[in-house]
Amino acid sequence: MRDDDTDTPAANLAVRPSAGQAATKADKADKPRRKASIRASNESHLLACAEAVFAERGFEGASTALIAERAGLPKANLHYYFPTKLALYWRVLDDLFEEWNAAADTFDASSDPVAAIGGYVRAKMELSRRRPLGSKVWANEIISGATHMQDILLKRVKPWMESRVTLIERWIAEGLLAPVEPKTLLFMIWATTQHYADFEAQIRALAGKRALSAASFEATTEEVVKMILRASGARSPNA
């Protein structure tokens, strides 16, 4: 027998973890990911339910008990994720702003005002179609005086708007837009696109339909895009 048998199968088995040990280590490594995934899923469900309740009742009329009931969870579970109603309300507003902010990526992605403004209007219309309740929460808060969202307006919305105003002014100077007032143009885009969420019931009643079909909404979106582009006098750099 050799004095040094460290290369024998028996020696290798002595230091190599068993299949069960390897699985245990993998499970331990995966546990934080599973926990984070469960938390994200629960938060998403609670936010969706909160958005619906806040849209129906406003901040004052809503309660964490109602939201927990809508979510099918004990109120204690809701408070585990969101300690107060105000914290939950802020999260709903902040989450909506992030989606609207992402919709404006077209301004950064293109130096062509036709593509940038048209893309922005389409993205905002799609958000009104997909997330009308969030838009109603935002509108109700603004109508009520924006008491709970001054930080969002002043620290996030205003800097965002000012950066877009600078870009619109540059397009005007380059002759790619009519000499419009930039803030008025942005307000018009917001009012028009969010109308299809905030006044959805009125649109349904006047159109004589339960809801706009996907094809009808797409056709309406393109009509809105054309109107806003005409009103702003937008043209492509090489047009």
Image (spheres, rainbow, N blue to C red):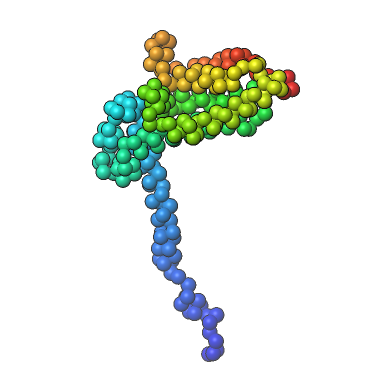
Figure disc tally: 0
Give the residue drawn at x 58%, y 16%: 228
Q: Is residue 14 above or below residue 123?
A: below
Give the residue drawn at x 36%, y 23%: 144
Image quadrant occupied by the C terminus = top right
Give the residue drawn at x 50%, y 31%: 157
| Residue 131 falls in image quadrant | top left
Left or right for 22, reference 3: left
Q: Is residue 63 visible?
A: yes
Q: Position of residue 120 (x, y in %)?
A: 56, 26
| Residue 110 falls in image quadrant | top right
Give the residue drawn at x 59%, y 18%: 181
Q: Position of residue 170 (x, y in %)?
A: 67, 25
> Which residue is situated farthest in the right direction here?
238
Q: Is residue 191 above or below residue 30?
A: above
Q: Is residue 140 visible?
A: no
168, 227: nearer the viewer: 168
